[in-house]
């Protein structure tokens, strides 16, 4: 079962995306807490892509593919913007972030905590971030 | 009373008994976090030294919203302003805890406890 959703790179589309992913996960069905974590991780990664597209002033699209494989949800997030590899993320200390009055720095911490495995690859112009979320502990 | 409306988030504020009270209804994400930031800045700029944030109807918060609270911790300390969040749902509270924000930001389970902290 493949579920595909495409959004334009705009923050206003994130709410629509979250509700779509929630509905798809409800139908599988997926435990409420796992669903919350997955939706939040996807939201954070897409918000990052949108942020980068704004910085670079490019209008693009994000494609999200969601599949259930055995006891795992696999999500591919595909975009054509500037490459940004979330697997190379280094965690920041929240006390340091607060001291520096930073508003960012938490998104990838959330992704890393909530997702069991992350893969990142670049194919020609496409960045593909693949998330694996186990449905059983 | 100030009110800003978006499709999925409504935020209101009022000063009662010298406490700047912010109520959030809906979802705070990269799109709507600016409204929270504006409201919080008004609270800091107000004459009140106490900010009370009602999260009873906060259904979602992404890192953009969490960042608003985190980035204001230092300013509030510098200006001797106390701020407290209350009535977060269990999933949202778990995100604050997971990131360690519960060590920087006062979070209480209900309004009574939040007021005791502010007036203590």
Image (spheres, rainbow, N blue to C red):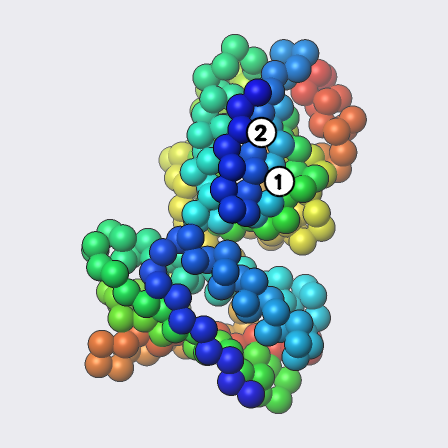
Are dots 2 and 1 in contact, CB under 8 Å?
A: yes
Work out which quarter of the rendered image holds the N terminus of chain B and state it: top right
Mark 2 or 1 closer to N-term?
2
- Tell me if A35 is positioned left or right of A47 in this view: right
Q: Is residue B26 above or below residue B116?
A: below
Residue identified by numbered label 1: B25
Q: Identify the disc placed on residue B12.
A: 2
Q: Is residue A6 above or below residue B116?
A: below
Identified at 61% across, 77% down, the residue is A134
**Discs 2 and 1 lie in a common subunit:** yes
Closer to us: B28 or B10: B10
What residue is rendered at 46% in x and 58% in y?
A: A14
Q: A96 above or below B116?
A: below
Query: In the figure, B7 relative to A117: above or below?
Result: above
As measured in the structure, the alpha-carbon distance from the residue carrying label 2 to the one carrying label 1 is: 9 Å
**Can the viewer see residue B44 in this picture?**
yes
Q: Nearer the viewer, residue A125 or B120?
A: A125
Left or right of residue B15: residue A125: left
Residue B83 as seen in the image, left or right of residue A11 = right
Counting from the top left corner in percent of width and height, residue B82 is at 59, 22
Q: Nearer the viewer, residue A111 or B12?
A: B12
């Amino acid at each position: 079962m493949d579920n595909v959703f495409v959004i334009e790179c705009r923050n206003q589309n994130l709410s629509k995306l979250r509700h779509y992913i929630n509905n798809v996960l409800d139908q599988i069905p997926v435990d409420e807490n796992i669903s919350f974590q997955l939706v939040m991780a996807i939201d954070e990664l897409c918000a990052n892509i949108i942020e980068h597209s704004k910085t670079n002033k490019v209008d693009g699209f994000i494609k999200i593919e969601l599949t259930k494989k055995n006891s795992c949800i696999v999500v591919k997030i595909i975009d054509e913007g500037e490459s940004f590899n979330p697997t190379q993320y280094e965690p920041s200390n929240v006390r340091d972030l607060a001291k520096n009055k930073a508003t960012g720095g938490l998104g990838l911490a959330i992704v890393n905590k909530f997702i069991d495995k992350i893969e990142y690859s670049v194919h020609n112009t496409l960045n593909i971030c693949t998330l694996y979320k186990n449905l059983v502990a | 009373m100030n009110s800003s409306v978006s499709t999925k988030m409504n935020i209101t504020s009022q000063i009662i008994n010298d406490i700047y009270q912010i109520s959030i209804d809906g979802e705070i994400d990269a799109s709507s976090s600016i409204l929270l930031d504006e409201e919080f800045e008004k609270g800091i700029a107000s004459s009140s030294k106490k900010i009370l944030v009602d999260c009873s109807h906060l259904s979602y918060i992404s890192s953009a919203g969490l960042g608003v609270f985190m980035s204001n911790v230092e300013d509030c300390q510098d200006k001797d302003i106390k701020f407290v969040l209350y009535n977060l749902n269990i999933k949202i509270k778990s995100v604050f805890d997971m990131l360690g924000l519960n060590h920087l930001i006062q979070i209480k389970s209900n309004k009574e406890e939040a007021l005791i902290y502010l007036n203590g």
